[in-house]
Image (cartoon, rainbow, N blue to C red):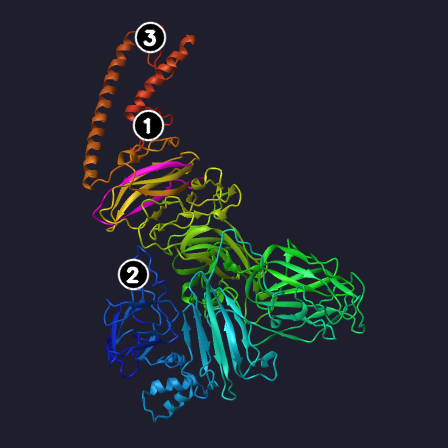
Amino acid sequence: MSSEPCGGYLDASDAGYITTPGYPLEYPPHQNCRWVITAPEPSQRIVLNFNPHFEIEKLDCSLPLPHITPKYDYVEIHDGNSETADLLGKHCSNIAPAPIISSGASLHIKFVSDYAHQGAGFSLRYEIFKTGTSSLPLSDYPSSQFITPSNQSDCSLILLLAFIGESGSRSDPVWREKELCGSDCSRNFTSPTGLIESPGFPDKYPHNLECSFIIIVPPSMDVTLTFLTFDLENDPLPGGEGECKYDWLEVWDGLPGVGPLIGRYCGIRVPPEIQSSTGILSLAFHTDMAVAKDGFSARYNMTHKEVSETFHCSNAFGMESGKITDDQITASSSFYDEHWLPRQARLNYHDNGWTPNEDSNREFIQCQLPAIPVPSLSYEAVWVRGERECDVHSPLRQNEFQPACKALFRVDLHTLKVLTGIATQGAISKETEKAYHVTTFKLEVSTNGEDWMVYRHGKNHKVFHANADATEVVLNRIPQPVLARFVRIKPQTWKNGIAMRFELYGCQITDAPCSELQGMLSGLLPDSQISASSMRDIHGSMGAARLVASRTGWFPNPTQPIAGEEWIQVDLAIPKTVRGIITQGARGLEGSTGAENRAFVRKYKLAHSLNGKDWTYMIDSKTGFAKIFEGNGHYDTPEVRRFDEIVAQFIRVFPERWSPTGIGMRMEVLGCELPVSATTPSLSAVCDFEQSLCGWSADPQSGVSWSLHTASSSSTGQGTHGSRQDLALGSDNFSGNYLHLDAGAHTQRKRARLLSPEVGPERGPLCLLFYYQLQGEAQGSLRVLLRDNEQEETLLWALKGDQGNGWREGRTILPQSPKEYQVAFEGFFDHPTRGHIRIDNIHMSSSMELEECTRGAMSGMEPTVDTVAVQPVPTYWYYVLAGVAALLLLVIVTVVVTLCCHRYHWAPKKSSAGHHHSVTYHNSQQPNQQGHQNCYQNQNLSYNRIQSPNQNHLYPATGPSPSLDPMLTIRMDKDDSYDSQC
């Protein structure tokens, strides 16, 4: 296909394929391909089905940024025969579009690539749409990457051979095999709700299927998957390597084979309801060549996520309600009479509770319990052996406060969650009416069911105090909330025996505002956008650095790395609002358990960038230096670190301290889309940044970015940047939003710019009002500029230096312009010392009189120095002003030289009259000394005014400048007779 011309006119009478040049290898740069597909009859419609192997340079091309001209790679489909027809979709990234159906008899397809970052491209099949037409199996597309050994008798091999042979004949045996395979196989789903069914449902599914169903969820939405019917070939020997080894359905919290595996299901037991907030939920369906069943049917539903700055992470996970199913609850053992099973461990359960098979009053005697299969992140089940200190000869339960049996009780939450609390309860036997309860327990957590960490508070294991009787509910808060998928409770002491009912509390990571997972865990962010300074395994994939989903992790190449020299980086593809990061340690080898292969980073620094070249460190406001973040204390347990919102496309982590075994890391980025505004801001509205950025955005070309201080940044009067006073909410309210820029080495002489939405031509003149703070010894500067669509800039307003810690008002006139333009707020510092710049309450007013706008600040808000607000002037006037200034300077120099010469000739005459010149001042008349000093100070003042003008022409000095010496200083010994002359 790569040798065929790029684009053309195609007849849909016969089904055909369109591929990017070179597919599935990288497409060339600078492509501009256009295809027009036409159906033979005007009443017919056309359907496009994309191969799931879809890879185009990742940019959020469906939502272009307001001020960025499209310049990346994309494919777009128009509902007609030209680009002027309605746009059906514009796609990029590594997620194939859902099937596309025209409304008429033609479709226009356009593919564009720029100069860099090529991918594999796409392949699609076009045909006449018929009722019931749906997408094809994964392998019913031209792609050499799907070639498999000939001894594998499956649908994908047969379909690929059908294309390679190019026979197309109905009598061809290959095509006859194609008819035996299902045609409803791989598909992507993007609608808010939908139905997913196995091929042929409700009839029996075909043999040898490898199907994938991918649900793609928009930002700020969750998806819930509910199974309606389920009937797959059962595995008669479940457990271990034999669990679901014939036909199975896997559910992945992300892309298949990339994100974490939620579970593998077979038989007739309906899988539990599954919820995901990673942005992608996938189903992978496998069938063998033997038994076929009726298959499955499931419905998914997307819901908008309600987030609040004041949310509480204390939701019940579902032990009591039943949302956590029986299959998610396992234990090391249960009592032999089958009346104390793990499923009875639900809080307030009416019938007994859970208790292990044995209790013991003998210490340090251990026995191994039978292995218990648990779900794992790999294809094979993982076995965990519970350990208990027990007396195997004693069937009787013992009295209170006995040494702990290592009885294990575990819950699988299916996805990674934030655990903040646990409520426990004992139980009363229905048979004997005897009460049992646990008095203390320990907690263990894991992300994969294999690697466990005992929860610590400080350096020691945390022992939680539980119940004093069998019916009371006791709530234990987790002092430091922890991220986990699997939770294990280990009773330590008890009364009468171990018996427990409980509930777990917490929330999703994404329940917090602007905390969406950016694609490391789910696979939405491809490996090509993950990079590092070095990698120990030169043949390894950067996908090893994915949080939880990876079984290993990133290890830099040096065995003895130097702090700050190694780094790992994530490219988010477009600028986004970033609010946090999750880090996790790593395991050196696939499936390894040795301690020498487990590593993690204890402390690290964070840097961010908009272009991948100019980097800005996250700054500690207390020290003014790069902030050191606390990392991990265990190689499996993730840690979340949140910070003030920043706008960035690239995030880079620099390890500073690490475990004795070296640096090992997996990670994820938390953030959200930048607010998008396609229209200019309302002229009557004040942008106080409380709800959004009002369409203002960071300049991608600037070296540093303004940061948004939000209500959550500081819960008290002292936040991360000192005293926080938001003007919009009053000086006594510290919880408002504003933009700020802090001084430091990362911002010295780098300019942060904030751009307004475009102001339309012939609009205005307007009065721009805003409030600002300019404080500190770093010599900060705040400027307001006007930028037209040809990138020409004009200075409108400027201020420099410390203005105190109060909010002050700035004003300037925005002129009427025949062109569209943007307003830019620019901040920078001359020195890397302490200081900050803040802006708030930006308002473009059309109602204020221009004369009033130029009068300066409002009453009660007078600045300490004058500010300048000027009308934009043509460029040539700058040359005129420069010439006038040069002429004026020449005149001043001439006057100064003349005065000096005159003074020089006058001095000898005074000397001949009996007065002696001296370098020092001598005065024998002490009472008159002060008068002489005042006289010379006045002389010095005049020299200052003439010969040392303020270097900043925008802010003329109003008095003497003690830091500047006069050009000429004359000291004389004089008689008292000269006092009167002075």
Q: Kindly report which numbered mark, 3 or 1, lies closer to the viewer in this rendering.
A: 1
Task: Locate residue 633, reporting x and y percent.
Answer: 59, 57
Q: Kindly report which numbered mark, 2 or 1, lies closer to the viewer in this rendering.
A: 2
Check if mark 2's residue and mark 1's residue have beta carbons within 8 Å. Answer: no
Q: Kindly report which numbered mark, 3 or 2, lies closer to the viewer in this rendering.
A: 2
Residue 824 in magenta stretch: yes
Q: Which residue is mark 3?
A: 978
Q: Looking at the image, can residue 924 be seen?
A: no
User: Hey, what amino acid is under mark 3?
Assistant: Tyr
Q: Is residue 905 left or right of residue 51?
A: left
Task: Locate residue 442, reporting x and y percent.
Answer: 68, 61
Q: Which residues are magenta?
A: 807-836
Q: Which residue is mark 2?
A: 70
Task: Locate residue 700, reporting x and y percent.
Answer: 34, 53
State the count of labels: 3
> How far separated are the C-alphas under marks 2 and 1?
49 Å
User: Hey, what amino acid is under mark 2?
Assistant: Pro
- Which residue shows up at 33% across the image and 44% down it? 684
Mark positioned earlier in the residue sequence (3 or 1): 1
Q: Which residue is mark 1?
A: 957
Q: Is residue 816 left or right of residue 769?
A: left
Residue 816 in magenta stretch: yes
Task: Locate residue 699, reporting x and y percent.
Answer: 34, 51
Check if mark 3's residue and mark 2's residue have beta carbons within 8 Å. Answer: no
Mark positioned earlier in the residue sequence (2 or 1): 2
**SS assignment at label 1:** loop
